[in-house]
Image (tube, rainbow, N blue to C red):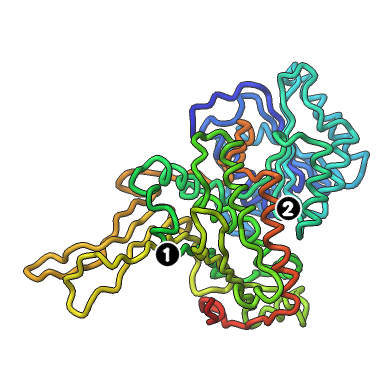
Amino acid sequence: MKDYTPTKPTVIVIFGATGDLCIRKLIPSFFGLYKKGMLPKNFRIVAFSRRPMSDKGYYAFLKDEQKRRKLPVLQGPEFKKFLKNVSYQQGLFDDPVSYKNLKKKLIGMDNQEFKRCSNKLFYLAVPPDLYQPILKNLSYHGLTIACSDGDGWTRILIEKPFGRDDETAKNLDHMLGKLFREEQIFRIDHYLAKETLQNILMFRFSNMLFEPIWNNQSIEKVEIKIYEKIDVEGRGAFYDNIGALRDVGQNHILRMLALIAMENPHTLDPNAVRSERYKVMKSLQPIRGADVKKYTVRGQYKGYRNEPSVDKNSTTETYFKIKAFINNKRWKGIPFYLESGKAMKESKAEILVYLKESGAYLCPNEGGCDFQNVIAFKIQPEEGIAIRFWAKKPGLVSVLEPRELSFLYNDVKTKEKTVDAYERVLFDCIKGDQTFFTSTDEVLASWQFVTPIIESWKKAKLHIYSKGTLGPDIKL
């Protein structure tokens, strides 16, 4: 992380403080930033949720939930010091009185503890159907208004999904636009906070080795994959209403595509980077009608319909594969294969860039050569970059064999360590850096690509695949 000395008092309000996201990610990530000295010296976390409990009751709740979920239990003297900055606020998301009480608490902190107006960060760690009542109540009770002296800020952090289709996404952004300016809105796609994805910009635009070949003259195809070995794990009610394409395709995978395919922004200014990502989204060739069968596959793992809270006749996809094209000069004619699935053979996320085979290469192998160079961006479980190339095998005979030039971030030898994605998200938001957050234009453009596919799938075949495989055996 860059050198950053936070100064102004900051209050973080977490809506949904007893939910899975807060327990698994947010509290541990805030604690991680606290230990690194990357939170403002004067900060407070207000945990807002509907369950009635005291501050101490909330601390005990966190500990019990961490044990129950078999998570690392946060404890020790340093965590006790951290908890002195955390308080619990009981309230209902659609109850005006709850927001009056919240406002009173925040004013009390400013007047009695900080002796000045503090920055306010509102984190919506709740399902999307709760966005509207929370946002309306925040606005109605004046909680979205920044400090009158102009020195402070008010920001909103929103988790995916950002709508269900292009229409609902427009409605959500219209509502956000009435309450906040674009620079106040931080839409989270935690994949963008992963070290390998952030490094794509440096890899491409800071090395003369790669940018000259990053086009349709040298690249044959690009594969972007997110495989999950787990199934829906008891989250059937949520997942059956979403599906794989909405869950990870519209956001994670299309953001990965944008970083691989974007033009050089020539600066790390957030507006420049997000603008180039948006141009990629806007250039995606639409897939609709009869083209859906030709360019997409959707699947469902065997036994999904028997999962708790899943419709017995569900046609929700747990797998998809899309053959996408970008209509611009750099990428015209090059396929981008976008693929994700649950209950797969393995868990991994990666981007593979296949370079074209050249007819002019030196091939001493008997029987000919059948190889190509591949650049792999490994996102998880390991984070790093690897390049497959070919070299002479040691010995008296001239034979080629594959070699790999690579590095991993969490390398024991070099002591390189990645930063947790949610720590990066929270740190960047407090700092006000929107580079790796999704803009309004990007959200709407990605839905414009995805929505026709979802609509056309209503009449398309659903392929059933067995757990522990790599999805339906259908070629595109």
Residue that label 1 marks: 220
Q: Residues within 10 Å of mark 2 (few under 14, many from 20)?
A: many
Q: Amino acid at mark 1?
A: Glu
- Classify 10 Å Cα crowding around label 1: few (below 14), some (14-19), many (20 and above): some
Upstream in sequence: badge 2 or badge 1 = 2
Q: Judge by depth and name the residue closer to the eye, 203 or 37.
A: 203
Q: Secondary structure at mark 1?
A: strand
Quadrant location of residue 161?
bottom right
Q: Nearer the viewer, residue 7 or 475?
A: 475
Question: Can residue 80 be seen here?
Answer: no
Task: Please name the residue that numbered disc 2 is placed on.
Answer: 162
Q: Taking 359 as reference, is 53 left or right?
A: right
The answer to whether residue 378 is above or below residue 16 is below
Residue 430, percent from left and from top: 63, 32
Residue 109, given in percent of the width and then of the height, sits at 77, 25
Residue 361 placement, left or right of 282:
left
Residue sitting at x 54%, y 73%: 344
